[in-house]
Image: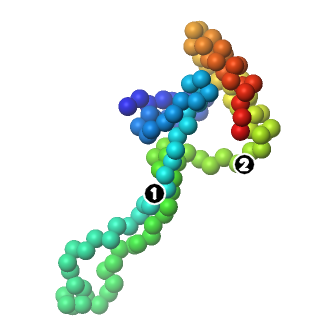
Amino acid sequence: MLVYQDLLIGDELSDSLPYKEIKNGMMWEVEGKWVVQGAVDVDIGANPTVEGSSEDVGVDDTTVKVIDIVDTFRLQEQPSFDKKQFLGFVKKYIKLLTPKLEGEQREHFKKKILREQSSLSY
């Protein structure tokens, strides 16, 4: 498993979930699944009424439905973008990221991202 770190904000992401490279390898497409988190119903065989306990000895059965990718990598929801706003966000990100890359990596990124930037669809 490889762990990747965002050069701008330090967030981490790994290749532990199945993904597909798109946009000439410049982006990943990952399919998330809804999963339920929370209490698990476990029958331990005890009967509180027989054992003389009158209080409820149950567990907190609160459950939460989350998307596995969002929960695993602690991703934050972003505001809705229309196409113009999304392209502006991506262009700003590219502008801030490019100086953080070094030498050959920077040239490779510029070459690929410029080719894909003009065809970016949302």
Residue 53 as seen in the image, left or right of residue 19: left
Mark 1 packing: few (<14 Cα in 10 Å), some, or many (20+)? few
The reply to whether discs 1 and 2 touch (Cβ–Cβ < 8 Å) is no
Q: Position of residue 29 (x, y in %)?
A: 55, 37
Toward which corner of the image does residue 97 lie, by quadrant?
A: top right
- Rendered residue at 28%/71% (across/down): 42
Q: Disc 1 marks which residue?
A: 35
Residue 72 position within the rendered picture, expressed as x and y whole percent measured from the top left: 46, 46
Image location of residue 81, percent across then percent down:
74, 45
Instruction: Note whether 30 is above or below 24 in the view shown.
Output: below
Of all residues, the one furthest to the right in this rendering is 84
Vertical comparison of 54 with 116: above or below: below
Q: Residue at x 75, y 24 (%)?
A: 118
The residue that appears at 19% across and 88% down in the rendered structure is 51
Nearer to the camera, 109 or 25:
25
The disc at residue 80 is: 2
Outermost top residue: 103
Determine which quarter of the picture holds residue 52. bottom left
Judge whether 103 appears above or below 29 on screen: above
**Quick one: quadrant of the C terminus?**
top right
- Give the position of the N terminus as an image quadrant: top left
